[in-house]
Image (cartoon, grey):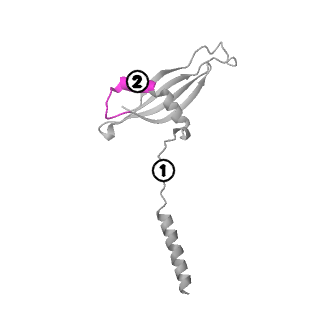
């Protein structure tokens, strides 16, 4: 019977020694390729510089406060192979009750360099332009 306990104790000890002495080296690898992005994320990346330039023109550059993307309100396809995207944004203030909401309409025009696209209606290269800017809050 002592041999059984000695065997169990010995195998338990060996298991513990081998388990504790194993060292695992791991690296932190940022894999941006597999990052999940929504349609809104992609549109934001495309129109950000245009919207940002207009917000700075409207409100000035404040390093502490920056505008925030709220949501896409509407996307309209135009006859000339372009899209009008209406976006609601929020501009924060030092006073949390005094934030501003604006509606920005941006036209995204993909290039017309494909033979399957009607060249009579579509004659532009890739461009992004601000179509309309409205202040929603007083």
Alpha carbon of mark 1 to alpha carbon of mark 2: how far? 43 Å
* Residue 72 place in picture, x, y as percent: 51, 34
Q: Residues within 10 Å of mark 1 (few under 14, many from 20)?
A: few
> What residue is shown at x 49% (from left), y 69% (from top)?
16
- Image position of 121 with respect to 8: above or below: above
Residue segment shown in magenta = 49-66
* Residue 98 place in picture, x, y as percent: 32, 37
Q: Which mark is residue 65?
A: none
* Residue 103 place in picture, x, y as percent: 45, 29
* Quadrant the C terminus occupies: top left
Q: Which mark is residue 53?
A: 2
- Image position of 50 with respect to 33: above or below: above
* Residue 101 place in picture, x, y as percent: 40, 33
Q: Is residue 65 found left or right of 21 in the rendered image?
A: left
Is 18 in the magenta? Answer: no
> What residue is shown at x 47% (from left), y 62% (from top)?
21
């Amino acid at each position: 019977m002592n041999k059984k306990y000695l065997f169990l104790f010995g195998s338990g000890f060996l298991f513990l020694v081998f388990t504790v002495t194993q060292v695992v080296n791991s690296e932190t690898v940022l894999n941006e390729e597999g990052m999940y992005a929504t349609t809104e994320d992609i549109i934001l990346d495309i129109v950000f510089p245009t919207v940002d330039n207009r917000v700075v023109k409207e409100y000035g550059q404040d390093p502490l406060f920056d505008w925030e993307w709220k949501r896409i309100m509407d996307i309209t396809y135009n006859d000339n192979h372009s899209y009008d995207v209406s976006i609601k944004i929020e501009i924060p203030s030092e006073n949390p009750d005094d934030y501003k909401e604006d509606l920005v309409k941006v036209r995204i025009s993909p290039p017309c360099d494909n033979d399957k696209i009607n060249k009579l209606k579509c004659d532009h290269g890739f461009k992004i332009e601000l179509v309309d800017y409205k202040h929603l809050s007083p």
